[in-house]
Amino acid sequence: MFARLPDDAATDVAITIDGEPFAARAGDTVAAALLAAGRRVFRAAPATGAPRGPYCLMGVCFECMVTVDGRPDQQACMLAVAPGMRIETGRGVRAVGADAGTPP
Amino acid sequence: MTTLDVAIVGAGPAGLAAATLCAERGLSTSLYDEHGGPGGQIYRGITTASRARAEFLGEDYWRGATLVPPFERSGARYVPGATVWALARRADGTFGVSQSAGPPTARYATTVEARAVILATGAQERPFPIPGWTLPGVLAAGGAQLLLKTSSLVPRGRVVLAGSGPLLWLLAAQYLRAGVAIAAFLDTTPRGRLAQAAPLAPGFMLSPYLAKGLDLVRFVRRRARVVEYVTALAVEGKDAAEAVRFRHGSHEETLPADLVLLHQGVVPDVQLAGAAGCALAWNDVQACFAPVVDVWGGTSVPGLYVAGDGAGIAGAEAAEARGRLTGLAVANALGRIAGTARDAGAQRHRRELAQALRGRAFLDALYRPADAFRMPHGDTVACRCEEVSAATILQLARDGCAGPNQMKAYTRCGMGPCQGRFCGLTVTELMAQAQRRRPADVGALRARFPVKPVTLGELASLPVGEDALRAVVRSPD
Amino acid sequence: MTTRAYDVAIVGGGLVGAAIAFGLRGLGAKLALLDEGDVAHRAARGNFGLIWVQGKGRPEGEYRSAQREGRPVSLPPYAAWTQRSAREWPRLAALLREETGIDVALRQHGGLHVCLSPDELAARAQRLTQWAAQAGNEAGVDVLDRAGVAARLPGLGPDVAGGTFCAQDGDCNPLRLLRALHAGVAHAGGAVLAGHAVTRIEPAPGRFVLRTAHGTVECGRVVLAAGLGTAKLAPMVGIAMPVAPNKGQVLVLERVRPFLPLPLETLRQTDDGTVLIGDAQQERGLDDTLDPAVLAAMAARAARVFPFLRDVRVVRAWAALRVMSPDGFPVYAHSSAHPGAYAAACHSGVTLAAAHALALAPAFAADAWPAAMQPFSPERFDVRAIA
Ligand SMILES: Cc1cc2nc3c(=O)[nH]c(=O)nc-3n(C[C@H](O)[C@H](O)[C@H](O)COP(=O)(O)OP(=O)(O)OC[C@H]3O[C@@H](n4cnc5c(N)ncnc54)[C@H](O)[C@@H]3O)c2cc1C
Ligand SMILES: Cc1cc2nc3c(=O)[nH]c(=O)nc-3n(C[C@H](O)[C@H](O)[C@H](O)COP(=O)(O)OP(=O)(O)OC[C@H]3O[C@@H](n4cnc5c(N)ncnc54)[C@H](O)[C@@H]3O)c2cc1C
Ligand code: FES
């Protein structure tokens, strides 16, 4: 999908993507990290459940929502990676209240 | 609470230039941007990218580096990571600018008071509603370019660029210079456009700008397969993009692709301006709505200004000049400089603006996207968030639906989190087509606050006055 | 543009006009439903979608400005009218589905008003008990303590003290209701004419001439149901319709999985999964701009009811204008000066949609104005002005 250009300056940032460790780079957004890790599908569309991935990467299409550190519906293209961040993809419409935390 | 002189939204070239000028003229100025660093879309990552490593971004990009130091010296307050989601004009003429900021785990909302507001929110990708454009692996080319600027990410595998406009050629050139292979460049510019566009800018035809643009196109043509006059473009795939199907001449072709980068120009981001009540007008050449502004960027709402691409697409250099012109107007309106000083100061920036606008008419005419790529049909998704098809909109329009806002009520188009940013123009033009009206008469989808989602908790964290409490509590007084 | 002629013209394509037009379809009259264009003051597009019975027509009145000004605000026939509409709603929903294929997502298994302090609860309980005891009231109301509310709703915040429950309450998707009513009129052969703002009405012998933004329309009878616009139009046919705007605001949260089994008076989950929070009464004329401070107050209250909604995103908000009569109750009128002219306005057009379509509409086609409509006459305001 995407590859890095040779880039010496940026330091690694250790995160996990769906439980798998991944070395993101300082300066990456969560979306950039996921794309660098070969992910295209970020979530299920709320209206129909169809698979979706980022489109605009500038915060206006809202197709890039993922769960970050347990917080659902975070806009991946607007959020910088941080060490230890846990990212989960593939979620659809979230549950709230008593059902929160149950898988879709 | 202290009242700012001017609040500026957006730290691209327009916002940076306006903020610098306002602060230099002694106005208390705050500049808000939802990103972590200045630069806007064109100069994204300008304070962090390394010129040594990323010379391939080109000199137009590196020009952005000259904007930041004067801004930093000007005394303007810079508030990164702040998303402005509402604007309210009070009875006394001041504005409440509501925004959210803070780390993801502890975001909170505040409302800042300002005597004047400049919106420098820039542009966004124009919708490109073709079959399959919602598949994962289909990205806006401008977005892919942002990945290049901020994360040094380039495509790997089979990548197809499709669409039209200078940004697409620029991205292709940047990739090629960085050593990335492109499977195909599908140019959707309709046949005959060059002949239509050429007479619009006789001077421009000889200018160095055009020569530079043509060099870029030639460079790409030499290094990649470029297919011209592409029609009937569609992306195919089950759960993600697998192939691109298209027609050129009478020939149909399907190319395998993992990554499809689409682009057919950018359009003004009018959400904040529209929701704040600024009059919008349809620009038929650019096929989009833009706020109605005077020569200083003043809108129909007194005290509210729009500068840069948010007031109509004109590019980064024009954005910078318009930012300074608006800054002068605000300094004058708030009593910092006399009208004569404003007008004298404006002369230089008007010249710069005129310079930057040479060739705009030519580019607009050349790259006006083909009708078929603005007005889809059949099952093609027009509204991504709510998955409303073109056929649904066309049918209701034929049945007499009053306009885009009634259409929104009927179909939910524009009700998702993107708030119509990726369907509004399509809906207007589809309705115009079905009802044989002009897009200007059909009108625009009305944007609503919050223009960017804000959590219920953030909203609840805003200070609530007595008045508001009295309006709400449904209990005996 | 040529003049078009109809037996009945309904002016106003909001919920009141559309429900009346739907009720008139198939009665043999050639119908036209005249509406403004895309952008208009149209409560039908900005409302909350409740079919709400509890408290309607109660002694203290539900309209707080009337209350503040000390006007007497009790109208028991309104309670009965509301309850009748709630009973007729399933029939309306079924007709709409049959004739248009549109499901308006009707739910009628009760609704709750939640109170956030013991004082609020005590006051509410007293008023609602009194209301339920009103003559002719057939709807019951249960006053619930915290445990009673908790048994019906998940994840309540600690401030919830209790609430009132009424089994007749419910909700629907009001946008689909509007669309279905329009579609139903069109399917039955009625003309639905957007962009036809009526600017003048000229009564002529045996007919009315309507001047519109899009040409002239003639009709044998005219029903004015133009919401706030009726105030200006009704005097042209000799009817006083003193309605004024009252601003409400609504917040919409992103889709979440279904969690709320029944609507609250100020918070409900739609069949699409979004959550609506609606409230606020402000008299600000035709100003329909949003007030972030009011939204914040609404958000804070909602978050006290369901704290788990705090991190759910608000995707949209709007303000819309209610169509308010001086006492907050509906106004239905016929013209004595110009027989064949009628007017209707109310501030609960969703709740009353069934009554309007199935009970009120026939009155506009009948020869005599039913006595049962007399309590809703605008004369009640004149009488009071004289007294
Ligand atoms: C993705 C993309 C890539 C582009 N790349 C190029 C290019 O390489 N070369 C070129 O010539 N032109 C490019 N353009 C065109 C570009 O828009 C203009 O040339 C130039 O950036 C316009 O400057 P501006 O100051 O008007 O707005 P922008 O540079 O777009 O700046 C607007 C800023 O406002 C911020 N903002 C918007 N809304 C809010 C809000 N509600 N709250 C807080 N902040 C907000 C944005 O995050 C952004 O930082 C690109 C456009 C896009 C959309
Ligand atoms: C925030 C809010 C929440 C609400 N919640 C509920 C609720 O939960 N339950 C409930 O039962 N009710 C609710 N309502 C009230 C309900 O929406 C209204 O009672 C109902 O919409 C009124 O219908 P109407 O047709 O009289 O007016 P509107 O719906 O306002 O429609 C008036 C129509 O007339 C048209 N018009 C105006 N002037 C002219 C003219 N000169 N010529 C032609 N056409 C004209 C307008 O364009 C418009 O289409 C709510 C209202 C608001 C504002
Ligand atoms: S990719 Fe469009 S909002 Fe993130």
Image (cartoon, rainbow, N blue to C red):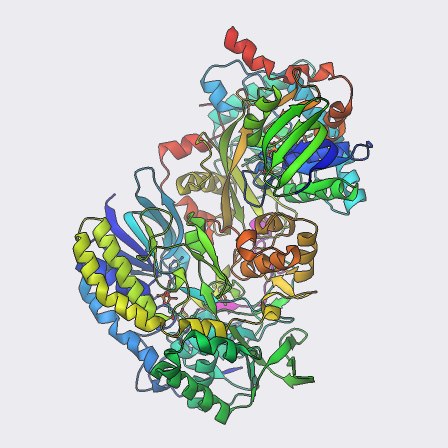
Q: Is residue B164 left or right of residue B359?
A: right
| Whole-percent x, y for residue B82 in the image | 35, 58
Q: Residue furthest top?
A: C387
User: Is residue A87 something one can see in this rendering?
Assistant: yes
Q: Is residue B425 left or right of residue C287?
A: right
Is residue A85 within the magenta segment?
yes
Residue at point 62% right, 56% down?
B431
Location of the N terminus of chain C by quadrant is: top right
Magenta stretch: helix, strand or loop mostly:
loop
Residue at point 58% right, 60% down?
B429
Q: Residue furthest front?
A: C2
| Whole-percent x, y for residue B360 in the image | 40, 72
| Whole-percent x, y for residue C187 in the image | 78, 44
Front-lying residue, C304 or A30: A30
Identify the image quadrant of residue C55: top right
Q: Is residue C87 left or right of residue C281?
A: right
Highlighted magenta segment, given as a residue range:
A84-104
Relative vertical location of residue B40 with respect to residue C113 in this rendering, above or below? below
Is residue A93 within the magenta segment?
yes
Relative vertical location of residue B472 with respect to residue B177 in this rendering, above or below? above
| Whole-percent x, y for residue B288 in the image | 49, 61
Relative vertical location of residue C9 with respect to residue A93 in this rendering, above or below? above
Relative vertical location of residue B272 with respect to residue B58 in this rendering, above or below? above
Front-lying residue, C305 or B22: B22
Residue at point 65% right, 48% down?
B401
Q: Is residue B198 left or right of residue B293?
A: right
User: Is residue B39 something one can see in this rendering?
Assistant: no
Residue at point 32% right, 74% down?
B46
